[in-house]
Amino acid sequence: MRDYNKLGMLCNQIKKIFLECAVIVIFVGISLGQKTVDKIIATVSYSPLEKPEIITYSDILWQIALSPDMSIESPSKEELSAALELLIQQKLLLLEAKRLPRNLPSESEVKQEIERIVHRFPSIFEFEKRLRSVGFTSIRDENFQKIIEDRLIIEKYIDFRFRSFIVITERDEQKYYREIFVPDFRRRNPELLIPSFEKVRDRIRETLVEIKVEQEISKFMDDAKQRAEIEILSEP
């Protein structure tokens, strides 16, 4: 028991030293040109001996910048908390993904993902203006590209771990068509003819797959948070 306690104390000392060094790195970055003081908000890891993933206030702002429905000028406390929770989930998935042999996303994949995100905004000019407001230079900024690369790593892990094992039967599709699609279509478009099942079957299948993927990720998160060490060091 005494040896176990010593190991625990040593692990905590290692983590403390790592976080102190991380703070130094962040403030050195500030002195080299950043305009605002960054701070560590949370750390995420699966083991005391594992290098923790750090979430800073800048990370939260970057997350908000990629969400067109969130205010970047004066984000609310709820928006900051929601962005932090999403980042914690992303870090947990990223830590799991990095344990598997994998090929890094290609330049073309990163480019396609950036284009997909840009299409959610009024224009690339507006999007890059939003990026610059949180410290990026443009969509070609190395730090921004790294965020997109990590997102793609997570997405590929989700495809491998969850999406590839989802089974949707015709019975599932028919049930969704009768009980959800048709009533919803009638409510939204009372003057239009209801599309046949065959015409919307592919769309229904995609919807059902995503619903089940979300359910599986939710179960994964419940388990991951039980196993992980998540430390909230400061309110965002």
Image (cartoon, rainbow, N blue to C red):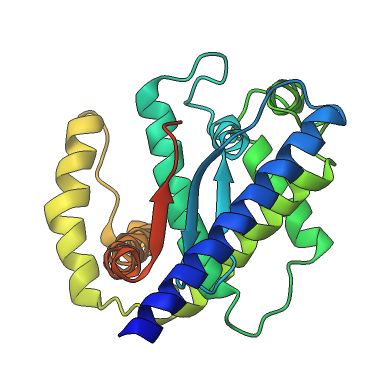
Q: Is residue 145 visible?
A: yes
The residue located at (24%, 76%) in the rendering is: 170
Horizontal side, residue 174 vs residue 5: left or right: left
Give the percent coordinates (x, y) of residue 13.
53, 63
Relative to 142, say whether 153 is above or below. below
Residue 136 placement: quadrant:
top right
Q: Residue furthest top?
A: 74
The residue located at (55%, 72%) in the rendering is: 50
Q: Residue furthest front?
A: 2
Q: In the depicted view, which residue is nearer to us: 160 or 147?
A: 147
Give the percent coordinates (x, y) of residue 204.
32, 59
Relative to 114, say whether 220 is above or below. below
The residue located at (29%, 70%) in the rendering is: 223
Horizontal side, residue 145 vs residue 95: left or right: right
Relative to 126, say whether 54 is above or below. below
Q: In the depicted view, which residue is nearer to us: 125 or 29?
A: 29
Horizontal side, residue 114 vs residue 139: left or right: left
Relative to 183, say whether 112 is above or below. below
Give the percent coordinates (x, y) of residue 23.
66, 43
Image quadrant holding the N terminus, namely bottom left
Q: In the depicted view, which residue is nearer to us: 122 or 135?
A: 135
Residue 162 placement: quadrant:
bottom left
Q: Is residue 113 visible?
A: no
Give the percent coordinates (x, y) of residue 109.
74, 61
Horizontal side, residue 43 vs residue 225: left or right: right
